[in-house]
Image (spheres, grey):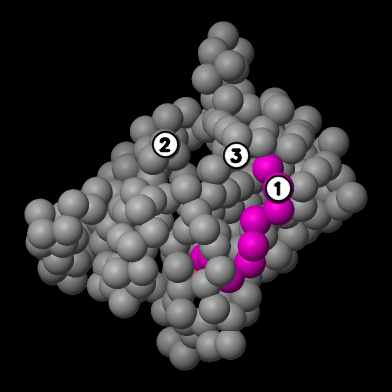
Amino acid sequence: MAYSVKTIFGPTLQGEGSNAGRACVFLRLSGCNAWDGRPETRAASACPYCDTEFRGGERLALDAILVRLLRLIPEGADAAQFGCVLTGGEPLLQADQELLTTLGAAFAWVDVETNGTRPCPPRPANVRVSCSPKAITGQPVVAEPDWWKILIPDQEPFLERALASGAPVYLQPTCPDGGPEGATYQANVERCLELCYARGCRLSVQVHKYLGLE
Ligand code: SF4
């Protein structure tokens, strides 16, 4: 089986969600069902704040992907603790049980970062689903994730559903100006704090952006 891969990179830190701050490598698959990635269609898309380049890339077989991922773990590192973030674009457009099983066997933990509009195939227990739900016309959120990551303010309408599920809910302020700075970002952080205090949510601030990591 081959997959369209945008980038494979690391070592770095997972910046978001339950594994924030942990050492990992990234597998970014190509393509997304929320936006076609062209600048001229961004404003009208479901995700005008998208900070990811997911167009293009190369076709790679699973064994080649695994070799490239494992090569990124630095010599002398505790490979048994390294994780892998499977992201996109929307990774569940392509990810199948074989990919998830292989990653789960090779890494201590795996985060699947999805917009929630595609069901996740069967997976090992250490492969967990992080859903950042997006309102895409005609494509409802069907995920039952291990945790939610709600972008504030853009995806706040999903908050009640996320809280009702009983899974942990992270709130993440969007960075409309690219980095974790600026007046709009500060306002988004303030809204997250209000909701954390009032609703028992957890803050997720994209650690990698504060550190200048990829
Ligand atoms: S679902 Fe994620 S990757 Fe796709 S357009 Fe939205 S923010 Fe970007």
Q: Is residue 162 magenta?
A: no
x, y percent for residue 196: 16, 55
Please report contact status of discs 3 and 1: CB closer than 8 Å, yes or no.
no
Q: What kind of element bears circle 1?
A: loop
* Residue tagged 1: 122
**On screen, residue 108 above or below 178:** above
Q: Which residues are magenta?
A: 115-123
Residue furthest toward the right?
1
**Residue 163 in the figure: left or right of residue 75:** left
**Image label count:** 3
Frontmost of labels 3 and 1 is: 1
Amino acid type assigned to the residue bearing label 1 in the image: Pro
Give the SS element for disc 2: helix
Contact (Cβ within 8 Å) of mark 3 with mark 2: no
Q: Residue 97 location, x and y as percent?
A: 77, 47
Residue at point 48%, 34% (across, down):
12
The three-letter amino acid code for the residue at tag 2 is Asn
Q: Is residue 147 above or below residue 56?
A: above
Tell me if 162 is positioned left or right of 90 in this view.
left
The Cα–Cα distance between marks 3 and 1, rounded to whole angstroms, is: 10 Å
The local crowd at label 3, few if under 14, some if 14 to 19, many if 20 or more residues have their Cα within 10 Å, is: many
Of residues 87 and 134, the one drawn nearer to the viewer in this rendering: 134
Ranked by sequence position, the earlier of labels 3 and 1 is 1
Q: How busy is the neighbourhood of tag 2: few (under 14 within 10 Å), some, or many (20 plus)?
A: some
Q: Is residue 32 above or below residue 212?
A: below
Which amino acid, by three-letter code, is at mark 3?
A: Val
Query: Residue at label 2?
Result: 19
Residue bearing the label numbered 3: 127
Q: Is residue 74 left or right of residue 131?
A: right
Which residue is drawn at the image coordinates 23% and 53% (left, top)? 201
- Taking the image as shown, residue 19 lies to the left or right of residue 104, namely left
Q: Secondary structure at mark 3?
A: strand
